Amino acid sequence: MMDEEMEVNENVKKVMFVMRKAPHGSIYSYEGLETVLITAAYEQDMTMVFVGDGVFALVKGQDTTDIGIKGFIKTYGALEHYDVEKIYVDRVSMEERGLTPDDFAIDVEVKEAEEIAALMEEQHATIPY
Amino acid sequence: MLHMVNKSPFSNSALEEAARIASKGSPILLIEDGVYAARAGTSFAPKLADILKDHPVYVLTPDLKARAVDKLVEGVEQVDYSGFVDLVEKDKVHSWV
């Protein structure tokens, strides 16, 4: 039983998704979120970090009705149900874009560049989106 | 961790974000349109000189030759394909695509 549990733990990889694209100008942002949810279903140790224009994906109040696409800001709300709780935003990217944590649709933790770098180094894999 | 950038710094913020986030001392490898960042005499060259204070910067020679980038910012190191493989094998890699 003990061995079995250890084996399961060894199969858990630390995976970080680095989100750097705005939400509607390309498919990256949406595909990234979908991939996070799929990967999380395999119970991996997930982290999402939003850098650059990636932070725009989290802004609340997005209404895509008139551009004829479904929009996926609500999907971010599903992350907590998949136990994806490490959701970080690069402070400089946020501030450059005139945003504060209150502007985001979900709870995030604001991180300094050095903290993000340290987190990247400890991952088994970092996936760019 | 090796940070790879394949976008021109004149059209994309990938290199500036990579350089700002990457741990001090982590190498940066410029490939494809990323090599334009290494060209001497551009408006980006002073920024690359700043990046070089914190990170070794490598540039892929075949991509330089293909784009006729023949004058490089001082301190940038050229690698061929086997040098590229050596860098990638040494550590984990993140691509700032």
Image: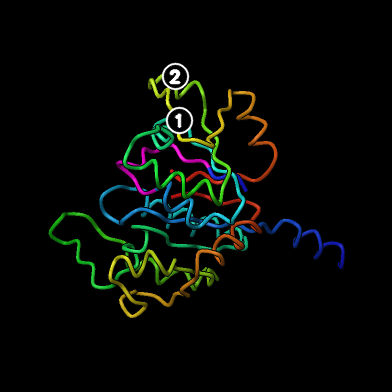
Name the residue at 60% across, 49% down. Answer: B26
Give how far apart the Cα atoms at labels 2 and 1 are.
Answer: 12 Å
Above or below residue B74? Residue A76 is below
Horizontal and vertical percent position of residue A52 = 37, 58
**If the image is split into quadrants, where does the N terminus of chain A sit?**
bottom right
Amino acid type, mark 2: Lys
- Tell me if residue A119 is in the magenta stretch: no
| Residue type beneath disc 1 | Leu
Q: Residues within 10 Å of mark 1 (few under 14, many from 20)?
A: some
Q: Percent x, y for residue A18? A: 48, 55
The answer to which of B36 and A2 lies nearer the viewer is B36
User: Residue at point 32% right, 65% down?
Assistant: A96
Task: State the residue at coordinates (39%, 40%).
Answer: B45
User: Is residue A53 shown above or below A110?
Assistant: above
Determine the chain carrying the residue at label 2: B
The percent position of residue A103, horizontal first and vertical second, equals: 30, 76
Where is residue A109? Give x, y as percent: 48, 75
Is the stretch drawn in magenta largely helix, strand or loop? loop
- What label does residue B65 carry, if any? 2
The quarter of the picture where residue A24 lies is bottom left
Residue drawn where x is 44% and y is 66% of the image: A90
Q: Nearer the viewer, residue A16 or A117?
A: A117
Q: Which residues are magenta?
A: B4-13
Q: Specify the label residue B72 is tagged with.
A: 1
Q: Quadrant of residue B40?
A: top left
Crowding at mark 2 (Cα within 10 Å: few <14, some 14-19, many 20+): few
**Mark identifier at residue A59:** none
